[in-house]
Amino acid sequence: MKLPPIKRVHVLLKPDLAPKHLEVLQVALQEAQMDYDFLIPPKSSPHEALLCLGGDGTILGALRHSSAAACFGIHVGRLGFLSATNLEGTLEFLKALKEGRYNLHQHLMLEAYMGKQPHTFLCANDIVVAKKDFYGILELQLFIDQTLANVYQVDGLIIATPLGSTAYNISVGGSVVHPLCQNILITPIAPHSLNERPLILGAHARLEIVAQKSCVVVLDGQSHHTLRAHQVLKVQASTRQATLLQPLNRNYFKVLKEKFSWGLKELPKERT
């Protein structure tokens, strides 16, 4: 099914972006005859998108923005796992967007509430509950659908989306889940028991986390908040989803292989 052509992009820049990268992007935008500006629209449009020039962090910030606009990334950062292409492939992808030749992927997002605050926090990758100090143990109670499921003795707990399964989650032994799945991942950080294992839940699950002492809550590695002792952190799937535009030829498993060197093995050298 052909998707609406993208006629205008709103460019978001990585804060410490090198001027030469912006110059390359502007040349590609002009050659593709794509209208653009450096403003974030107040609401989304099917014929407009946010172009994130930088790394995955730039994309995550855009996905949480209130405009809920579709996003795509041009990678100039360190990893670029979520990006559609790099600077060299920008012109080709811009032309494809103008012709409606792209994939539109909807990803699960999480929303969190702390205590009785009415404000909702959104995240596209993960919510991390972690201790404030380097020493000691953080005791966290996890309730799933109002039932006490576990009491963790840990350095922290990661509540991740499938999109975020390859971020902090994978570094502490969490499962890799295909980004289009509708699941909530729970992964302990440095558990002080060999019995603690990662959990994968359906997107319908409603979580409550209660800490026995004050700790920090970090959203997508970017937004930091304090969770007071015995205060309840509620987490559930958001009604809003993250929308990413990707090339038609993008294959998730090829990306895994490229970024994480999966399946790559050096052959032994022949003896002489």
Image: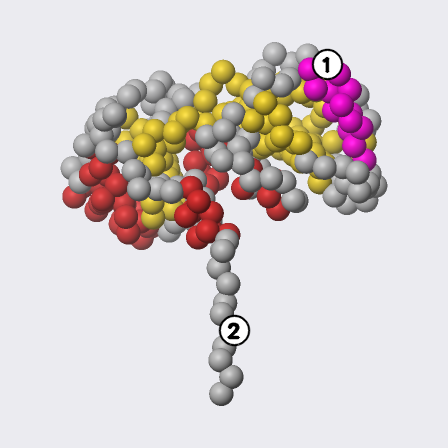
Q: Which residues are magenta?
A: 140-153
- The one nearer the camera, 168 or 76, is 168
Q: Main secondary structure of the magenta part?
A: strand
| Percent position of residue 256, x then y | 47, 47
Q: Tell me the amino acid under the disc marked 1.
A: Gln
Is residue 133 visible in this depiction of the protein? no
| Percent position of residue 169, x then y | 61, 40
User: Could you tell whether 134 is left or right of 267 in the image?
Assistant: right
- Residue 151 within the magenta-colored segment of the rendering: yes
Query: Taking 244 as reference, is 84 above or below it?
Result: below
Q: Residue at x 63, y 40 (%)?
A: 174
Here the colouring is secondary structure
| Percent position of residue 155, x then y | 75, 39
The residue labelled by disc 2 is: 268
**Quarter holding residue 201:** top right
User: Could you tell whether 34 is left or right of 156 in the image?
Assistant: left
Which numbered disc, 2 or 1, marks the residue closer to the eye?
Answer: 2
Query: Taking 102 as reference, is 115 above or below it?
Result: above
The residue labelled by disc 1 is: 146
Q: Residue at x 38, y 29 (%)?
A: 105
- The one nearer the camera, 117 or 191, is 191
Label 1 environment density (alpha carbons within 10 Å; few <14, some 14–19, many ≥20):
few
Q: Tell me the amino acid under the disc marked 2.
A: Pro
| Percent position of residue 34, x then y | 20, 35
Q: Secondary structure at mark 1?
A: loop
Q: Secondary structure at mark 2?
A: loop
